């Protein structure tokens, strides 16, 4: 029988005060917390894997730009974006399993999540086909080629979410790298060597997700083999789906919130300003690879630690994230005036000022990726993460309307930085409030136990 979640409800867990009572057996071992002693190593390892995937992603952009005409590149981007939006919405099933899991057998939970993967993926594929029939920008033919990628895309995300909860960071990293590498190999074969067009490029992209799914299922076979009967519409199955969709909605809001200033900038200043600003934006946001790596490393320990241990892990991880990102931000700010014109040309020299203006906000927002591990995964409160995203979206949008007309790309950077800072502050306040409530509950329980 699957154990009910330790981190979601207090009705079925022991009183926190019980944790303060000495064990009957003095040398009773403390439960093993996955990844508790490997946070630093896992962070470094994740950064090394990101050092592989980032150049691969850059190479993909170069190939698409050079071997597909601008219209073909645009069609490729639109159809991939359509699939990616649905994948973000449906791709949190594994994280939901991590949030709801106890210390028992994971297979019943994973089985339900994988069944939901197939069901949601099939429905989402139908939506993609419908979009292809309506959106002439990429059309039904490309939709037919891209739609099958949705199911393995969600499946990979599902397995990845469970792996993070068990602190199996190395396999998680492998899964993240396989897909872009497989796509690059496919594009080199079908586009560069064989001279295929956008259809071939999308086909290679779709196949890469199936290749990655094979790696994920084989590498994590202990999580789902032998398979168990998945009752996806029972209480636990519905709970997994609801929590996953709530988390997915947060991802969609995040995606819009990160880019809302681009639409305002294009409206007031045109596409050229967007192109210049995007260089600074991508350079600044690349710093978030660091806190993302830290968040990946602490997910397992935070889920399985005691409340005191979890909050301590989060505070320590956020401090490290701020320190590392702050140091990198200062370095980027110093070298940007020399590197950007040299790499991108003098026409992009105007990206330097927006980049420098973005850096403080990017640093302020860096801990949010780590705090969300506590808010959404540990405490199963995705609506708090949603509030963080909505606050950032509203503040960024409002400041964009105020700052972009007079200041252009620099105004967009300022608006975005203010939005990042607002979202970061909200995440900290939610975290501190939840941690304080849990501390007060633990103290009350301890006092009640002492009176008894």
Image (tube, rainbow, N blue to C red):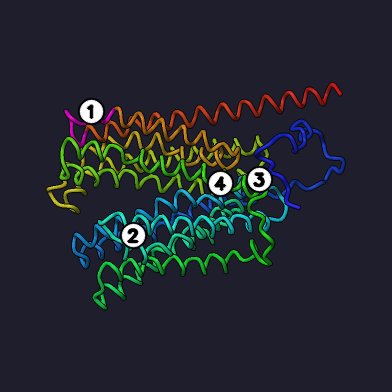
Label 1 residue SS? helix
- Which residues, given as a range, are shown in magenta? 399-410
Choose the circle earlier in sequence order: 3 or 4: 4
* Mark 1–mark 4 CB contact (< 8 Å): no
- In this view, 314 is above or below 168: above
Choose the circle earlier in sequence order: 3 or 2: 2
The magenta stretch spans residue 400: yes
Reading the image, the residue beneath label 3 is: 304
The quarter in which the C terminus is drawn is top right
Gap in Å between the C-alphas at discs 3 and 2? 34 Å
Reading the image, the residue beneath label 4 is: 298
Reading the image, the residue beneath label 1 is: 403
Gap in Å between the C-alphas at discs 1 and 3? 45 Å
Gap in Å between the C-alphas at discs 1 and 4? 38 Å
Residue at far bottom of view:
194
Task: Give the label, 1 or 3, closer to the camera.
Answer: 1
Q: Residue at x 50, y 66 (%)?
A: 213
């Amino acid at each position: 029988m699957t154990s009910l979640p330790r981190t979601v409800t207090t009705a079925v867990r022991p009183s926190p005060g019980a944790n303060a009572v000495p064990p009957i057996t003095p040398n009773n071992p403390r439960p093993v917390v996955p990844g508790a002693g490997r946070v630093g190593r896992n962070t470094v390892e994740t950064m090394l894997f990101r050092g592989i995937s980032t150049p691969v992603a850059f190479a993909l952009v170069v190939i698409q730009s050079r071997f597909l005409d601008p219209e073909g590149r645009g069609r490729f981007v639109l159809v991939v974006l359509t699939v990616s939006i649905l994948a973000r919405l449906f791709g949190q099933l594994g994280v939901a399993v991590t949030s709801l899991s106890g210390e028992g057998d994971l297979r019943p939970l994973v089985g339900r999540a994988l069944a939901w993967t197939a069901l949601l993926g099939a429905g989402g594929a139908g939506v993609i086909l419908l979009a292809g029939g309506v959106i002439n920008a990429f059309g039904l033919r490309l939709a037919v080629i891209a739609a099958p990628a949705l199911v393995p895309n969600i499946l990979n995300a599902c397995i990845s979410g469970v792996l993070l909860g068990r602190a199996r960071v190395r396999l998680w990293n492998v899964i993240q790298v396989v897909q872009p590498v497989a796509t690059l190999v496919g594009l080199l074969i079908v586009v560069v060597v064989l001279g295929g067009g956008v259809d071939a490029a999308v086909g290679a992209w779709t196949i890469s997700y199936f290749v990655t799914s094979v790696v994920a299922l084989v590498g994590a076979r202990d999580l789902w083999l032998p398979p168990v009967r998945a009752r996806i519409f029972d209480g636990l199955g519905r709970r997994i789906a609801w929590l996953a969709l709530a988390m997915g909605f947060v991802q969609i809001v995040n995606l819009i919130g990160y880019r809302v200033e681009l639409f305002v900038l294009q409206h007031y200043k045109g596409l050229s300003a967007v192109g210049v600003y995007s260089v600074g934006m991508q350079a600044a946001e690349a710093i978030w690879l660091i806190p993302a790596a830290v968040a990946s490393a602490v997910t397992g320990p935070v889920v399985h630690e005691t409340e005191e241990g979890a909050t301590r892990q989060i505070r320590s991880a956020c401090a490290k994230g701020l320190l590392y990102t702050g140091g990198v931000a200062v370095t980027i700010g110093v070298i940007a005036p020399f590197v950007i014109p040299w790499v991108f040309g003098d026409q992009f020299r105007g990206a330097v000022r927006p980049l420098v203006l973005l850096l403080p906000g990017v640093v302020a927002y860096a801990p949010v990726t780590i705090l969300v591990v506590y808010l959404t995964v540990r405490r199963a409160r995705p609506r708090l993460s949603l509030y963080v995203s909505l606050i950032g979206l509203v503040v960024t949008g409002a400041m964009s309307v105020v700052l972009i007309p007079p200041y252009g790309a620099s105004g967009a950077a300022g608006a975005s930085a203010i939005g990042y800072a607002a979202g970061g502050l909200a995440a900290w306040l939610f975290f501190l409030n939840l941690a304080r409530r849990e501390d007060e509950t633990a103290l009350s329980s301890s006092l009640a136990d002492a009176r008894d």
